[in-house]
Amino acid sequence: MRNRRRTTLTALAFASPWFLGFCIFMVYPLVASIYFSFCDYSVLRPAIWIGAGNYVHLLHDNIFWTALINTAVYTVIALPVGLIVALGLAMLLNMKVKGMAFYRTLFFIPSLVPLVALAVLMQFIFNGQYGILNVILRDLFPFVHSQSFPPNWLGDPAFSKLVLVFISAWGAGNAMVIYLAGLQDVPVQLYEAADLDGAGFWAKTRNVTLPMISPVILFNLVMGIIGTLQVFTVPYVISPTGSPERSIYFYAMYLYDNAFIYHQMGYACAMGWILFVIIMILTLLSFRLSERHVHYGS
């Protein structure tokens, strides 16, 4: 008994730095953010308890609703596009073709580009006046004489979100690799049996591939929900104000501005917890709706 107690104390002593760091950098900020969300707190002054004042104010904040709607629209478009692009690339890269290692590396490299550098690069590509894309479009279609062609991609609210969707799909390499790992775990015998039954490509994809990688699809779906709802870096680098007409002013950008520009940390904490609740509800809903479609059996 004494040796067991000594072993336990020794293990706790070795693990104590991790527990200490976890409490200081995770537990305390989490609990503090809940408290500050009910306070008028600017970091520079002591917090003043105001109850649900921050949450009530959010309900009447037009910029909050604009940012939330922009984020919702972006998520509805970017999430399925990203999932389909990543899955399509993974299926192509799962074929037995000579030089496949090179192709896999080639399609994965874009996801390694830092987001700030990617945003700056895309600004040069999609610039309405001297962007590379518009220069190419003018050369390809010299007979088109219209003020709306080529479009001002980042200066037109009708196209600005679509540019961000394209940038999101450009970095689909991480999800692609996860899909690829799932595809390689699909038993070959199932494809052979489908071939004997005369199944074509689409039939095998619908009845074999998708059901067998359904847990991977669910994982990428949940991660995609979390990532798209927290989109920040690329739109903030492109336009910190969310112009044109706040069309790319997203939820995380408004949260950041409240916390570090306007010094309304309590207000930002309330926004953070609302975002947490939204993500949690959508995640639980994804698991609930996928119960009949996700197969974990080997």
Image (tube, grey):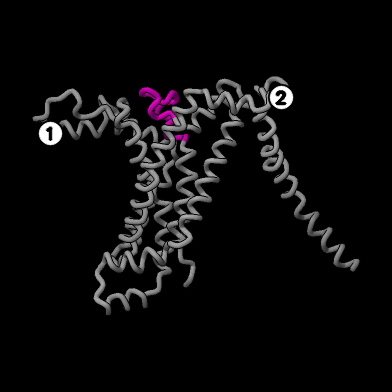
Residue 99 counted in the magenta span: no
**Residue 262 can be seen, yes or no:** yes
Question: What residue appears at the point 60 percent right and 31 percent down from the top-left corner?
Answer: 270
The percent position of residue 45, horizontal first and vertical second, equals: 70, 20
Measured as percent of width and height from the top left, residue 227 is found at: 47, 43
Is residue 107 left or right of 287 when viewed as pictured?
left
Name the foreground residue: 208 vs 242: 208
Magenta stretch: dominant secondary structure: loop
Question: Alpha-carbon distance for marks 2 and 1?
Answer: 62 Å
Q: Position of residue 269 (x, y in %)?
A: 61, 31
Q: Secondary structure at mark 1?
A: loop
Give the magenta-colored segment's residue range: 232-249
| Quadrant occupied by the N terminus | bottom right
Residue under the point 48% across and 71% down: 297
Q: Residues within 10 Å of mark 2 (few under 14, many from 20)?
A: some
What count of labels does the image hold?
2
Q: Name the residue at 34% across, 64% down.
A: 94
Instruction: Report the residue at 20% width, 26% height from top.
Output: 148
Could you say whether the residue bearing mark 2 is in a helix, strand or loop?
Answer: strand
Give the residue at mark 2: 49
Q: Amino acid at mark 2?
A: Trp
As drawn, 255 above or below 89:
above
Would you identify the image quadrant in which residue 193 lies?
bottom left
The part of the image, by quadrant, that contains residue 117 is top left
State left or right for residue 95 relative to residue 53.
left
Judging by the rendered image, the residue that carries numbered circle 1 is 141
